Amino acid sequence: MPDRYASNASSLTAPASHGFAITPSDTADLPETTRAVYVGAAGTLVVRLSSGATVTFANVPAATLLPLRCERILQSGTTAGSLVGIL
């Protein structure tokens, strides 16, 4: 299938071109740093950002797209589900 935008440079404001399911872990980093995280099931999300800061997002509604550069989603404290890393 042709992709008329294939020669355009990707940026943080461009549409996503890849995604992956996230399994929260207190010890393992994500396979890639995200551009955003999709939360499919409501709850609390505890993340380690690319800066190294750990941040808790409480009461995140279902179907929320958070523009976060995350390197890890922690299992401890995370109750949100159906998480997808967006690149």
Image (cartoon, helix red, strand yellow):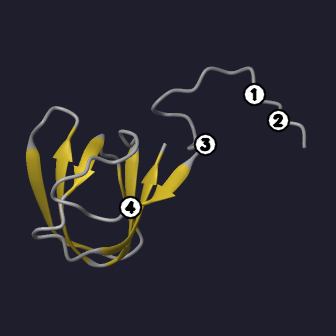
Marks 1 and 4 sit apart, C-alpha to C-alpha, by: 27 Å
The N terminus, quarter of image? top right
Q: Which of marks 3 and 2 is nearer the N terminus?
A: 2
Q: What element carries label 3?
A: loop
Question: Could you say where residue 5 lies in the image, as x and y percent from the top left?
Answer: 75, 29
Circle 3 crowding by C-alpha within 10 Å: few under 14, some 14–19, many from 20: few
Callout count: 4
Q: Is residue 71 left or right of residue 47?
A: right
Circle 1 crowding by C-alpha within 10 Å: few under 14, some 14–19, many from 20: few
What amino acid type should be assigned to the residue bearing mark 1?
Answer: Ala
Q: Earlier in the sequence, mark 1 or mark 4?
A: 1
Q: What element carries label 1?
A: loop
Question: Could you say where residue 35 lies in the image, as x and y percent from the top left?
Answer: 40, 41
Mark identifier at residue 72: none
Marks 4 and 2 sit apart, C-alpha to C-alpha, by: 27 Å
Q: Which residue appears at 51% of the width and 27% of the height?
A: 11
Check the image and name the residue furthest to the right: 1
Q: Earlier in the sequence, mark 1 or mark 3?
A: 1
Circle 2 crowding by C-alpha within 10 Å: few under 14, some 14–19, many from 20: few
Q: Which of marks 4 and 2 is nearer the N terminus?
A: 2
What amino acid type should be assigned to the residue bearing mark 4?
Answer: Ile
Task: Compare residues 28 and 15 and report the one nearer the observer.
Answer: 28
